[in-house]
Image: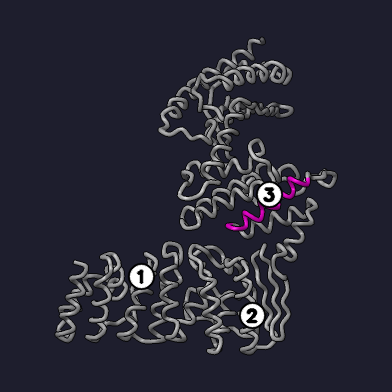
């Protein structure tokens, strides 16, 4: 072996042994053995650039440099392209393969597959050699563990559930063709079965949805699309067809799985789904073109009525409404049709696009001025439609779900929001609906309800019989919700009703309600001692203060 090649390899191996010994100690100290994790390390890149040897034991990101660096001697100048390709890389590969196939660093150090990358910056042309090694024994063991896991943890009945960690690895294995065939009729039943088991645990269900859609997105971006497209740049989501793409005939099964994965990703990323479906159309997918044009086929895409025209697409999760006659019958017709769609399984997290001459909105300052909002506010101008709005809301309400009428953020609202909050402002007949909504709303991630108490009081005032529903509204406030300026306890019967309702509440709920009404404990104490406050009222305010002392 050439002396320069040997010196380069010696420098690399000396550094790599130190790195791997430290990593091995860390990995072997893991408390739990995960049956779905064959091993941890799956990548090594050795490169020469900027006058130094760089070693990466994890696949590097474009925007950061976490390489281990070695100051190499002048021998590097003697490394020609021929020596790199015929001596250096084969020797590096041989040594790495021997280590990879052994248990020298522990049985869980290496994954069943391992990628080696050797790259050199040369004066004339850069060199990059990539190869993937496979430990077939580990791969077969992992396949057996996965099948056992599917039988015992996924397809079994409740109360058996996988651990959160195993759930993560399972999501990754679902899109790994070494382990499971990439076909919808194989992957989808597994996803649905676990989803059904997690249905009663919203946190775990949302976590699971995020895990498998993220795994699919990674596969699309890093494996599938790069076969046919180039990224516009490292950070963009735009993909540019490769010059020879027109000559490529994508595998039909893989293209179909790409479309399926795009639909699944749409559960959390609607815009990404649409972007991927359009790329699938460029690859020749008629299925993707049909989805974009008319949805999955489960619902009649067009309804032409006497007063309104309605188009729907369950794949893009959109409903387009054109009001033909600005009257009660038009809004009633649309409400009936959308309610029927939801009853048949149309996604509740849809976006409604409206063509109408009316511009009605609810008196809530931070609500999105969307077509969805505009439609329901318009329907609320007709009292005869209140029962239809109530029926719609009862079907639409879904905790931890969001309409798609605005970008994710502080204006995002739970399905049914516009109808429920509007009905609560217009009629006392729907206070029980408001209460049920407030019990369901995700107070950690939705903020619109914070301003509802003020609008509610503007509509109905503060009365003794309203105290229970007002408390429900206050308790649904986000932790950043501010005191309600027009919620004034200035009469004995109001203070007594408030005290009576708070007696049955937990201490944190009492504190939240009193803060939203009085602003602070000090302000409540001041009101309880103020000579300007009626004596009997002062006594009840003092009792309220005692509830949180």
Decide whether the magenta segment is chiefly helix, strand or loop: helix
Question: Which quarter of the rendering shows the N terminus?
Answer: top right
Above or below: residue 346 compared with residue 253? below
Tag 1 near tag 3, CB within 8 Å:
no
Which of labels 2 and 3 is toward the front? 3
Q: CA distance from mark 2 to mark 3?
A: 35 Å
Left or right position of 478 against 377:
left
Residue named by callout 2: 334
Q: CA distance from mark 2 to mark 1?
A: 33 Å
Q: What x and y, as percent, mark residue 174?
A: 61, 43
Question: Which quarter of the rendering shows the C terminus?
Answer: bottom left
Q: Is residue 113 visible?
A: no
Residue named by callout 3: 185
Residue named by callout 1: 475
Please tell me which of labels 2 and 3 falls first in the chain.
3
Q: What x and y, as percent, mark residue 383?
A: 53, 89
Residue 545: quadrant of the picture:
bottom left
Which residues lie in the magenta part? 252-268
Please tell me which of labels 2 and 1 falls first in the chain.
2
Of 305 and 84, the residue lying toward us: 305
In terms of secondary structure, where does tag 2 sit?
A: helix
Above or below: residue 265 compared with residue 371? above
In terms of secondary structure, where does tag 1 sit?
A: helix
């Amino acid at each position: 072996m050439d002396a320069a090649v040997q010196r380069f390899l010696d420098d690399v191996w000396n550094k790599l042994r130190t790195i791997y010994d430290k990593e091995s100690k860390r990995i072997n100290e893991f408390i739990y053995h995960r049956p779905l994790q064959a091993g941890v390390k799956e990548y090594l890149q050795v490169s020469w650039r900027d006058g130094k040897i760089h070693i990466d034991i994890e696949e590097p990101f474009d925007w950061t440099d976490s390489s281990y660096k070695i100051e190499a001697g002048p021998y590097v100048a003697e490394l020609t392209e021929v020596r790199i390709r015929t001596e250096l890389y084969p020797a590096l590969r041989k040594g790495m393969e021997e280590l990879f196939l052994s248990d020298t660093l522990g049985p869980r150090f290496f994954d069943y597959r391992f990628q080696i990358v050797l790259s050199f910056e040369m004066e004339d042309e850069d060199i990059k050699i990539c190869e993937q090694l496979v430990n077939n024994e580990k791969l077969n063991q992992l396949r057996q563990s996965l099948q056992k896991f599917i039988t015992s943890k996924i397809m079994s009945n409740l109360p058996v559930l996988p651990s959160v960690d195993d759930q993560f690895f399972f999501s990754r294995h679902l899109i790994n063709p070494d382990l499971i065939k990439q076909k919808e009729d194989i992957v989808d039943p597994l996803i649905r079965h676990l989803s059904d088991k997690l249905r009663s645990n919203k946190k775990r269900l949302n976590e699971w949805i995020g895990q498998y859609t993220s795994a699919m997105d990674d596969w699309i971006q890093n494996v599938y699309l790069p076969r046919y497209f180039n990224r516009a740049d490292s950070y963009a989501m735009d993909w540019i067809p490769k010059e020879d793409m027109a000559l490529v005939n994508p595998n039909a099964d893989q293209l179909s799985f790409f479309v399926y994965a795009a639909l699944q990703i749409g559960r959390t990323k609607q815009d990404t789904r649409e972007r991927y479906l359009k790329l699938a159309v460029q690859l020749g997918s008629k299925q993707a073109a049909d989805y974009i044009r008319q949805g999955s086929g489960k619902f009649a895409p067009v309804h032409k009525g006497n007063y309104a025209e309605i188009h729907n697409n369950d794949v893009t999760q959109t409903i387009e409404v054109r009001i033909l006659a600005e009257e009660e019958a038009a809004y009633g017709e649309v409400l009936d049709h959308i309610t029927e769609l939801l009853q048949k399984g149309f996604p509740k997290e849809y976006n409604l696009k409206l063509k109408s001459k009316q511009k009605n909105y609810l008196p809530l300052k931070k609500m999105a001025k969307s077509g969805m909002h505009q439609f329901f506010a318009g329907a609320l101008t007709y009292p005869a439609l209140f029962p239809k709005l109530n029926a719609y809301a009862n079907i639409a309400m879904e905790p931890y779900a969001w309409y798609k009428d605005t970008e994710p953020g502080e204006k995002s609202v739970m399905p049914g929001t516009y109808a429920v909050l509007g009905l609560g402002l217009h009629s006392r007949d729907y206070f029980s609906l408001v209460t049920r909504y407030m019990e369901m709303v995700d107070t950690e991630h939705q903020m619109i309800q914070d301003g509802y108490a003020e609008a509610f009081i503007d509509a109905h005032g503060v009365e003794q019989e309203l105290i229970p529903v007002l408390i429900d509204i206050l308790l649904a406030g986000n932790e950043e919700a501010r005191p309600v300026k027009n919620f004034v306890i200035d009469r004995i019967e109001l203070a007594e009703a408030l005290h009576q309702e708070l007696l049955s509440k937990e201490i944190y709920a009492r504190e939240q309600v009193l803060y939203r009404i009085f602003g602070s404990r000090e302000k409540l104490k001041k009101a309880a001692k103020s000579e300007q406050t009626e004596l009997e009222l002062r006594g009840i305010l003092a009792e309220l203060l005692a509830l949180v002392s």
